[in-house]
Image (tube, rainbow, N blue to C red):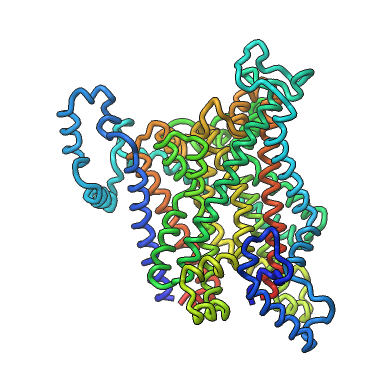
Amino acid sequence: MAVFLIRRVLQALVVLLLVTVITFALLRMIPGNVAVAIMGPGVYRDPAAIKLFDTTYGFDKPWYTQYLIWLGHLVRGNLGYSWKLNQSVASLLGTRLPKTIALVGISTILALIVAVPIGVIQAVRRNKLLDHVFNGSSTLFYAMPSFLLGILLILVFAIKIPILPAEGPQGEGLGVIFTQFNALILPILSLALITIALFSRYMRSSVLDNITEDYVRTAKAKGASERRILIRHVLRNSLIPIATLLGLSLPGILSGALITEAVFNYPGMGLLFYQEAQSSDYPVLLGVTVVVAVATVVGSLLADVTYAVLDPRVRYVSQ
Amino acid sequence: MSIIGIPPEMPDPDNPSAVGLATVSQSVETEEQREVAAGILPAGKPRSTFRRGLEVFLENKLAVTGVGIFVFMLVFCFLGPLVYHSNQTVVNFSSQTLPPGAGHPLGTDDNGFDVLGRLMIAGQISLEVGMAAALLATVVGVLWGAVAGYFGGVLDAVMMRVVDAALSIPILFLLLVVVSLVTPTEPILILVIALTSWLTTARLVRGEALSLRTRDYVQAMKVMGGGSARAVLRHIAPNAIGTIMVNATFQVADAIAFIVALSYLGLGIRPPQEDWGGMLSKGVQYVSTGYWWLIFPAGLCIILVITAAIFIGEGLRDAVEVRLQRR
C-alpha cells in the first residue's frame, strides 16, 4: 500500500508540473503585448512606458525565466494579479471558489443519491419498460445542451409558474447561499439532472457487470434472497467503481458548472473565468486554470486511493 | 487472438485496413477451422466476426435508428438547400420573427431569415465541425496512443503524463482560453476542439497497443525485419479499430456539444455564419416572448444528432464486443 501511495503521489506531482507548463505555454500564445493590453492602445506612443512595465513585471525576460518566476510565486500561493479587476487572483478566488464548491458539491451529492437507485433499478429490470424510460430520459438529458436545460427550467419555474427566482444567489460571502436558498434550487437542479444522466448510466452497467459474477450465483445457491444478494453483495461491489467515476467526472462537472453559472448569473469561479476570457484577462485565466487542474489531479488521486483501500486487488495489479 | 475478422476472400469495403490484415485473418481462419475439427466450436459454416458484429449492430434497433437519423440530418443539411430555396443573406426587418405559416414553414428569425433554410446551413457547420474535429482528434489520438503503447518505457511514461496533465484541465476551460486568444472561424474551431479531445482516444489506444505489441504476428513481423513505423501504422492502429471507431462516434457527439456551448458563451462561430448552437442561443433570448420556433427546431436538431451519435456508438460497442469475446 505504501509503495502504491508513493508512486501515485509522485505521478500526481509530475502531472501537476506538466499542467503548469501547458497552461503557461497556452497563455503565452496571447497575441500582442501585455503592457498594451493593460494600459490601452494609446501606450504605443510611449515606448518608454511599455519598457518600464515590462521590466517592472518581468516581461522582458526570456519565457523560461518568466515561467520559473511564475512557478515560484505559485508554490508560495501567489496566483498573480488581475490588473483589469485591480485585485489579486487569490482574493478573487477566495470569494468565488467557495460558491462553486457549494454548487458542484450539493449537486453532485444530490446526483449520487438519485442516480445510484436509478442505476440499480435499471439493471435489475433491464430491457423492461422502466429501464427504457430511464434510459431514454438519461440520453435526452445527456444530449440536451446544458444551457437549454437551464433556460427551460427558468421558463417553467420562474416565468410560467413564478415560484423560484431566475437568478442564482447574488451578493458577497457564502452566507447568501443559505439566506437565498430558493435562488440556489434551479442552478442545482440544472447541474444535477445532467450529472444524474451520466452517473445512472455508469451505475447501471456496473451493477450489470456484477450481477453475472460467480459470487452472486454462489449466494443464490446458498439460498440468499434476491434482496439480500442485491444489497449485501451486488450494490457494495458496484459502488466501488463509482469512486473512480467521481474523480474522473470532476472536469466534466466543472465544465457543466461554468455553463450553469453563466445561465443563472451565479457568481462562482466559472462565471469569473468566462467573463475574464472575453477580455483576455490572462492572470485570472492562468490562476483559475491552475486551481481547477489541481482540484482535478487531487480528485483523481483521492479516487484512486479510495479505490485501492476499498478493493485490495488494485494495489497488487498496479505494482 | 485479435482480429478484425475479415477473411481474405471478402475484403471489407468499410475498412481500408482490411488488405493489410489479410495474412492475420488467414491464421485466424485456420485456427477456427482447427477448433471446429477438434470439436471445440460447433461445426457448420464458419462466419466471420465482422459479419457477426454487423448482425449484432443491425439487431440493435436504437443503433439502426441512430444511423437513420444521422443520414437524414446529413441529407437535410447538405442536399436540403438545393431543393428548398430561402433568403439567408439579405436582412429583412419587415418579415422579422414571423410565426410558422405560408412561405415560412418554421417562421423567420430576428433578421427575417427563414428558419427552415437557416437550420440547413447552420447544420452544415455543426455537422462539419463535429465530424472533422472527431476525425482529426482520432488520428492524433491513435498515433499518440499507439506510439506510447508500442514503445513503452520512458517514452510511454512521458507521453501519458502529458495526456494526464491535459485531461486535468476541464475541456471547456481549455477551449475558452484558446478561443479568447484567436478569432474562431470554422477551421480554427475544428482544430481547437480536436486538439482538446484527442486525449481520451490516446489513452484507449495506448491500452490496446500495450497488449497488441506482444502478439505473435507483431513479433513475427519484427523477426522478418519490419520497422517500428510499420508495426504502429499497419498492425497496432488497424487492430485497435473497433475501440477507435466506438470512441470516434462518441467524439462526434461531444464535438457538436462543445461548439453549441461555445456559441452560447458567445465564443463560437462568428456572424454572419451560424451553427445550431448559435441559432439556439439567439432563440433563447426570446424565451419569454413565446417565439417557440426560434428555440425548439434548433434544439431538437442538436438533441437528435447527439442522441443518434450516442446510439450508433453504443451499437458499435456491442458489435465490437462480439469480436472481443473471440480474442
Q: Residue at x 20, y 39 (%)?
A: A57
Relative placement, left or right, of B34 versus A95 is right
Q: Quadrant of the C terminus of chain A?
A: bottom left
Query: From the viewer's perspective, is B121 left or right of A290?
Result: right
Q: Is residue B64 left or right of residue A182?
A: right
Instruction: Say if residue A80 shows up in the picture.
Output: yes
Rendering quarter of residue B166? bottom left
Quadrant for the N terminus of chain A, please. Answer: bottom left
- Looking at the image, which is closer to me, A188 or A211? A211
- Residue shown at 59%/44% (left/top)? B130
What residue appears at the point 63 percent right and 53 percent down from the top-left corner? B249
Count of marks overlaid on the render: 0
Question: Residue A312 placed where, x, y %?
Answer: 53, 76
> Is residue B323 positioned above or below A168 on the image?
below
Residue B321 percent across, percent down from the top left? 69, 67
Q: Is residue A163 above or below residue B42?
A: above
Q: Is residue A257 left or right of residue B119?
A: left
- The vertical placement of B124 against B60, above or below, is above
Tell me where residue B164 sits by quadrant.
bottom left
Q: Please provide percent x and percent y for residue B149.
A: 48, 69
* Residue B274 picture quarter: top right
